[in-house]
Image (cartoon, helix red, strand yellow):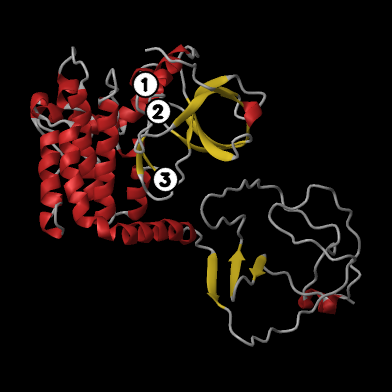
Amino acid sequence: MAFCFPPLVIRDDSLRCFVKIGAGGFGQIYRAKHTKWGMDVAIKLLLYKDGSTSSIQREANLMFQGGNPNVIRIFGLYEGRVGEPQLPLQSGLVMELMPKGSVAGLLQTLAAPPPWPLAFRMAHQIGLGMNFLHHLSPPLLHLDLKPSNVLLNDSLDAKITDFGLSRVARSVSKGAREKDEDEGGTLSYMPPEALQDVNYKASRASDVYSYGVLLWSIITAKEPYDGKPSSLVRFRIPHGDRPDVTLIDCSQTEGLEDLLKIMKRCWDQDANKRPTFLDCVNVTEKIFELHQRGLSDAVRDVLKQLEGDICSSLRSVQISRKPQNEVRPPVVSCVTGSLPKQETAAGYTNTVKKEPSPCPAAMTPPRTTQRQTSTPGGVYINMSNVVGVQLGNNNYMNIVQKPRQRHRTAPSSVNTSENAQKKP
């Protein structure tokens, strides 16, 4: 396949603020700011046995045929050291950033299926993206379709990623492949013919089978064959075992029964009897239209849950309504020089010479646990023993734990009233 122009090569001189945001079987994923475009991008580094880049360049030529709203957009090839000059030169892909993570991450966070309008839209969008890839010339097979390879944007629209990387996967280190297989991840979405025939050749039907299992994962929020040994899964799939459909109650909502029927057709034992993705989207489109009016509310509710999940992990943070006309007790303090900066766990690294405290013992407040208080918008937040707090989406911070040291303006020691009475 020829291109009228070579893929764009993006290097470190156009990028800044590298932050590692994930890792997988193919390699590591970084977030970075493109200084000339003024936008954040995702950089997927790929691991190779021999360190060559010829494989990724061949695959990128296929992936650049994008242009479908349900397929991740590839901006160019990456060559650089992810902002670390001491690292060796690495290669990868520069892609659009999907800030809401993957479908796998969403299902794990919700611990339940998404609201039906959103679940049916995901099913339809994934089918549209795969139908587009299969109608390229030549067809582009995915061969690793699963929840972690479907990403979500700010509106929770689904986009397929890691397509065209099937041959690259064979050059990934052996340890990474073995880890994925041991966990039963990709194996759970592989068609039976791939597990029973050493002369197996991938086809469009291979992706259709994976799509059927992916639909089951979305509407049950579960991992297929969860907890089962990979050796047993590998043995039983060719004998007709499939994910447990008894977990699906078709009476829950309109259209679910039709989705269950197309799902079972997708994972048919006979590859020739499986539908095409065009057949699938004709079904999912009608199902989604039944629930489209509730989509806005469903997306809003899920986004609220995703934002609330950030705060729920801060177990040491207590937030309560600030009482009106609150009278705070007077604070006893002593002057130790200029106003000190807030003492935190990060501390200061300079050496401080200890000097006698200029404050009388009776005026020195007792030592207490470190506590920070702020008053944003009518509430106050108390945090004890907190190294750092992140609130909201699309932001990040780096925390470096350092030995805690006394500020240079603080007294060299603090005497309790009991100790003070013992002194002559």
Q: Secondary structure at mark 3?
A: loop
Cβ–Cβ below 8 Å for labels 2 and 3?
A: no
* Amino acid type for the residue under numbered disc 2: Gly
Residues tagged 2 and 1 counted as in contact (Cβ below 8 A) = yes
Residue 293 falls left or right of residue 368:
left
Q: Position of residue 155 (x, y in %)?
A: 40, 50
Report the Cα–Cα distance between label 3 and label 1.
25 Å
Residue receiving disc 2: 25
Q: Residue furthest front?
A: 4
At 83% from the left and 63% from the top, the residue drawn is 410
Numbered mark located on residue 153 in the image: 3
Q: Look at discs 3 and 1 and give the one toward the viewer.
A: 3
Q: Earlier in the sequence, mark 3 or mark 1?
A: 3
The amino acid type, in three-letter code, at marker 3 is Asn
Q: How many marks?
A: 3
Dot 3, how many residues are within 10 Å of its Cα: few (below 14), some (14-19), or many (20+)?
some
Percent across and percent down for residue 417 are 78, 78
Query: Where is mark 1, residue-wise?
Result: 169
Query: Is 366 rendered above or below residue 252?
Result: below
For the residues labelled 2 and 1, the Cα–Cα distance comes to 8 Å
Residue 379 appears left or right of 134: right
